[in-house]
Amino acid sequence: MSTFFLQGVTFGGIAILYLKGRDLGLGFVPVRSPDKRDGAVIVGGSIAILGLLFVASSVITALGLNSAQNQIVEVGRQNPSVFLLLIPLQFLLVGPGEELLFRGLVQGTLRESLHPARAIILASALFASIHLFSLSGEGKLVYIGIAFVLALVLGAAYEYTDNLTVPAVIHGTYNAVQFAGAYLTATGGL
């Protein structure tokens, strides 16, 4: 729990300190309430990212590969109520914190000197690789590969809408659905 709390706060805090250090201010990262178009992108992006996870999981299973797990899954299996506590944190801290750093700051900074597609790819690669530190088990590269593909959707949503709220909500939704599924699995609800 503390890892997820610190992750959201730390990633967001690093981004804010960097913005202040460069005298960019918070205006460098566009954040606003979603309009109808943004809402459609949130719904479509959430469906796309969950669909990609389903396809990737099917391919991994068909190929007989293993994917590592986030270490919090083991904690949640021992105490499933942890999954329920993590769901709101995905919307309040983790999604916004990670998106502020990786989409708002990293992708936004890279976009200053690179084509937006390259900025999305590089920010997504960095985003995926940072997850390595929270993984356990075999198949870490498989997990990183999936995270990279999913991050491309988040980066594209940010680029398309120019609103950090959109990828933050998509990211929170993705994680929350994962934890809800893990809770149902751990409690025999599935």
Image (cartoon, grey):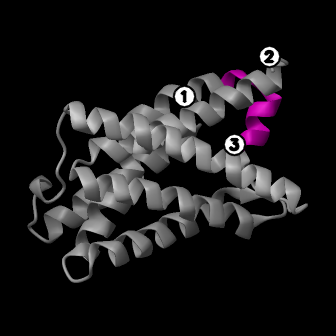
Mark 2 residue type: Gly
- The reply to whether dot 3 and dot 1 touch (C-beta < 8 Å) is no
- The reply to whether dot 2 and dot 3 touch (C-beta < 8 Å) is no
User: Within 10 Å of the Cα at label 1, are there few (<14), some (14-19), or many (20+) other Cα atoms?
Assistant: some
Residue carrying label 2: 189
Ranked by sequence position, the earlier of labels 2 and 3 is 3
Mark identifier at residue 87: 1
Q: Quadrant of residue 123?
A: bottom left
User: Within 10 Å of the Cα at label 2, are there few (<14), some (14-19), or many (20+) other Cα atoms?
Assistant: few
- Asked if residue 80 is among those painted magenta in the image, a careful observer would answer yes
Tell me if 141 is positioned left or right of 123 in this view: right
User: Within 10 Å of the Cα at label 3, are there few (<14), some (14-19), or many (20+) other Cα atoms?
Assistant: some
Residue in front for this viewpoint, 70 or 145: 145
Q: Horizontal and vertical percent for residue 49?
A: 53, 46
Of discs 2 and 3, which sits in the foreground? Answer: 2
Q: CA distance from mark 1 to mark 2?
A: 17 Å
Q: Which residues are magenta?
A: 72-82
Ranked by sequence position, the earlier of labels 1 and 2 is 1
